Image (tube, rainbow, N blue to C red):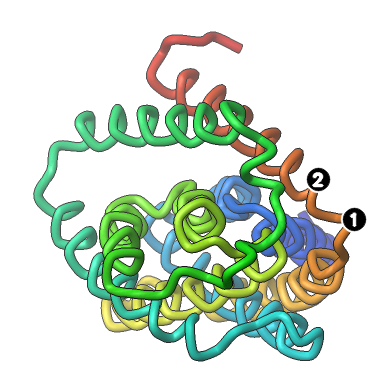
Amino acid sequence: MSPALEIFVVVAASLVSGFINTLASSSSAVTLPLMIVLGLPATVANGTNRVPILAGALAALLAFHRAGVLEWRNGLFFSIPVIAGTVVGAALASVLDARVMGWAVVGAVVAAFIMLVSNPKRFLQEAAPDGPRVGFLTAAVFVPIGIWAGFIVLDSATYMLLGLVVVVGYDLIRANAIKSLFLLWISLASLLVFYVEGEVDWRIGSWLSAGSILGSWAGGRFATKEWAKVWVFRLLLIVILAEIGQLLHRFGVLRF
């Protein structure tokens, strides 16, 4: 692949992944395999992937802030248990058996899909009439979500949205805005770790960031539209179904 074509493919893929990650989750399903195909070792690809996620989170936050749907005070409050849980999850990931982790991922993704389809109206509801439920009890829900984000990352954004909509009482628009704030902290912390370990390819990361910024900005603008909520929900379902198929194939349950 020529250098020019490589840059085009990388930017195009990260643009799509940034859009998906802002509206739903799992942008890594697009960018990680691409970097491995381009010849990056898996650990370097994993570290490099945090660069566009961080850049995309910043772009999405700016779009949500300018639209007036990002509640900074509550977002920062709920960020504390997410960050604390992320530290615990990262520690767990370093000691658990890889196959145990794999089946934990499958179970969590299937559980997220079941929760979404069991009561879709609840997920698409308007914000709670008495305002978001902000307190230590609702904040406690985000500790296990943070643990999952630090443990394996995959589909953690879906659980963030579920917690913000179902437990706290936000509508999907404001929940997506705060989710982007969560992703900012998580990606920043993990990028620092990978940087210290020397597992970041900054050349590929910079091109990925260019596409991610554009895609995340577009996703943030799209997500602030009231009529877009149903499309965000549909995209979540599609992404999770694709993840389930990919994971079952990895463990030899499906052959394709």
**Residue that badge 1 annotates:** 227
- Closer to the camera in the image, 35 or 193: 193
- At which x and y percent is residue 8? 84, 64
Residue under the image location 81 percent in, 45 percent down: 230
Instruction: Identify residue type, mark 2.
Output: Val
Are the residues at dot 1 and dot 2 in contact (C-beta closer than 8 Å)?
Answer: yes
**Is the N terminus in the top left, top right, bottom left or bottom right quadrant?**
bottom right
Q: In this view, does 172 lie to the left or right of 1?
A: left
Q: Which residue lies furthest to the front in this view?
A: 130
Q: Residue furthest left?
A: 95
Q: Is residue 131 left or right of residue 67?
A: left
Q: In this view, does 127 lie to the left or right of 118?
A: right
Residue under the image location 25 percent in, 37 percent down: 101
- At which x and y percent is residue 75? 49, 81
**Among the 4 quarters of the image, the one containing residue 246:** top right
Is residue 16 in view from this perspective? yes
In space, the residues marked 1 and 2 are separated at their CA atoms by: 7 Å
- Closer to the camera in the image, 36 or 189: 189
- Closer to the camera in the image, 153 or 15: 153
From the viewer's perspective, is residue 255 above or below residue 236? above
Count of all numbered marks drawn on residues in the image? 2
Rendered image: mark on residue 230: 2
Q: Is mark 2 on a helix, strand or loop?
A: helix
- At which x and y percent is residue 243? 55, 33
Instruction: Identify residue type, mark 1.
Output: Trp
Residue under the image location 68 percent in, 59 percent down: 172
